[in-house]
Every structure is written in structure tokens, then in C-alpha cells.
Amino acid sequence: MLVIEGLSRQFGDKAAVSDVTLQIGHGAFVGVIGRSGAGKSTLLRMINRLQEPSAGRISFDGRDVSALKGAALRQWRAQAAMIFQQFNLVGRLDVLTNVLMGRLATAPTWRALTKMWSADDRAIALSALEQFDIASLAAQRADSLSGGQQQRVAIARALAQEPGLILADEPIASLDPRNTRIVMDALLRINRHFGITVLCNLHSLDLARTYCDRLVGMAQGRVVFDGAPEQLTDAVARDLYGLEAGEVMDLAPARAPQGLGVTLPGAVPA
């Protein structure tokens, strides 16, 4: 279980996140919603420790991750995998190598520098690509792919880390509707098939209602809503988003049935 207690982050006089307390159980798919600047990205980056909290505590399965340093912090960042809006791939490298970068926490640095990855690491990376039907792209340069393909590679890299938690920060913000559905289906497959907890920042309320089993609404750095999607009425959404409500309450694609993909070596399906 992920437990966040009194988490805050100050930037000068501005409170980006203020006194957030949440408990998120294993296997949940939680959407974090709210206006731009509500503190959603800062919250996820603090959980991964890419940004340091000004106050508060974060724990995962009883382990305090707030004070981790050095190798222990690197291991935590592997366990709490981040997926970014900008994909964060190395464009000149091939797809398989980009996914193998997710194995760095478990492999010596010289393997990455010499590209002498172990057979197990390669099998895990290829299996991750197969999960999203892009294993055929393994030898292509990452910068030759479409935006949707690049984001699926980024998700495969996160899966190759064998995480217990995936933190997705606006993963569909730069994608068209078709690729939005493909990427959200990919995240849902990870959640359902492997039982990996997903915490996902989303701008579209309808997508959040479609894919998430719990919604956390933020405004001015604070949690102002926490409940099931059906509890988030249009009236509550208008209060949460104000003038932005019209643009986030668009039509979303229906959730498609999820097939079971290829199980990664060592992974235990939910």
C-alpha cells in the first residue's frame, strides 16, 4: 500500500502541494484530476522523489521512502516507475535499447555502456514490447516512431523495471484520440494483468471516469475530492474545474475488453 501523510511542497511563497494525505491500495487504478497548476505533477514527482517534499511522509508497504538516499533511492525509483508526457526516450537509440534502460537498476552500468545486456534482461524487454504489439519495432530508432508508438515504448520501459507502482504524468496530453485510447488501454492492461498500481494524472474527466476505479481531485495543491468515478457528478466537476469544465468534460471512448498479453519472466499476473 502507498501511504502519503501530510505531503507538502513549497516553491518560495507558493504552496504547489499542501498537506495531502492519501492511502492507495495494491492494484488500484487511480486518476488524479484537476486544473493545470493544481499540483498533480508535483505530487507524482514527489512520490518518485524527483522533487523533494517540504513536509510530510511517503511509505510503500510499510517502508519509509521519504528519506531514501543513494542506491536505496535508485531502487525506489525503479519500483515507482515514471511515465512522462514527453516520452523521455533517447531518439538515436533503437527501441529495444530504450526499453532495456528500464533494467539499469538491476544491471551494472558497464552493461548499458557496452550494450552487453544479459539474456534475461533482453527477454524481459522483448516481452514488455510484445505486451503492446510493438516487438516488431525493436530495431527501429525511437525518433522514427509516431507519438503513440513512442509512448507505448515508454510504458514498456516502465514495465521492464518490474515496478510495484506506475506514476503516469499526463501520458496522453500530446496524443490524438486514437493513440489516446491505445495508450490508456496499455496502462489498464498493466494494471489488470499484472496487478500493478497505477496513479495517473489526467486532464479529461471522461477518460478518468472510463479507465479509473478511483478519482482524486486536486485544487490549489489540496485534495478536494476522493471517491469512485460515479460519485464525481457534473456539478462537482464544475466546482473542481471552474471555467475549464467545458473542455475537460468531452466524450471519451468506451473501455474496450482487455486481452491477456505475454507474461514477463518472473512476473506474477494478478
Image (cartoon, grey):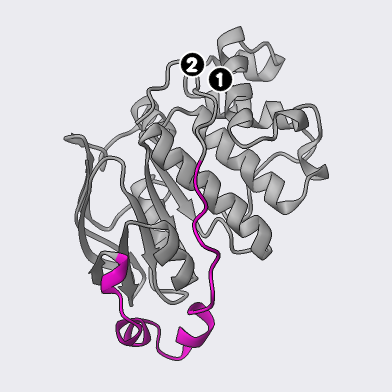
Give the Cα separation between the discs numbered 1 and 2.
Answer: 6 Å
Q: Residue at x 40, y 89 (%)?
A: 242
The chief SS type of the magenta part is helix
Mark 2 lies on a secondary structure that is loop
Pick the quarter of the image with the N terminus. Answer: top left
Q: Is residue 85 above or below residue 64?
A: below
Residue 175: in sight, yes or no?
no
Q: Residue at x 49, y 16 (%)?
A: 265
Binning the other alpha carbons within 10 Å of mark 1 as few (below 14), some (14 to 19) or many (20 upward) gives: many
Q: Position of residue 112 (x, y in %)?
A: 64, 19
Pick the quarter of the image with the C terminus. Answer: top left
Q: Position of residue 174 (x, y in %)?
A: 65, 63
Write down the quadrant of residue 80 in the picture: top left
Q: Position of residue 51 (x, y in %)?
A: 40, 52
Q: Position of residue 195 (x, y in %)?
A: 35, 36
> What residue type is disc 1 on?
Ile
Seen in the image, is 137 located left or right of residue 44?
right
Q: Residue at x 58, y 51 (%)?
A: 183
Front residue of 106/25: it is 25
Circle on res. 265: 2
Kindly give the residue lying farthest to the top in the view shown.
119
Binning the other alpha carbons within 10 Å of mark 2 as few (below 14), some (14 to 19) or many (20 upward) gives: some
Kindly give the residue lying farthest to the bottom in the view shown.
243
Magenta-drawn segment = 229-258
Asked if labels 2 and 1 touch by Cβ distance under 8 angstroms, the answer is: yes
Front residue of 15/263: it is 263
Residue 250: say if magenta: yes
Front residue of 128/88: it is 128
Seen in the image, is 231 located left or right of residue 266?
left
Mark 1 lies on a secondary structure that is helix
Residue located beneath label 1 in the image: 124
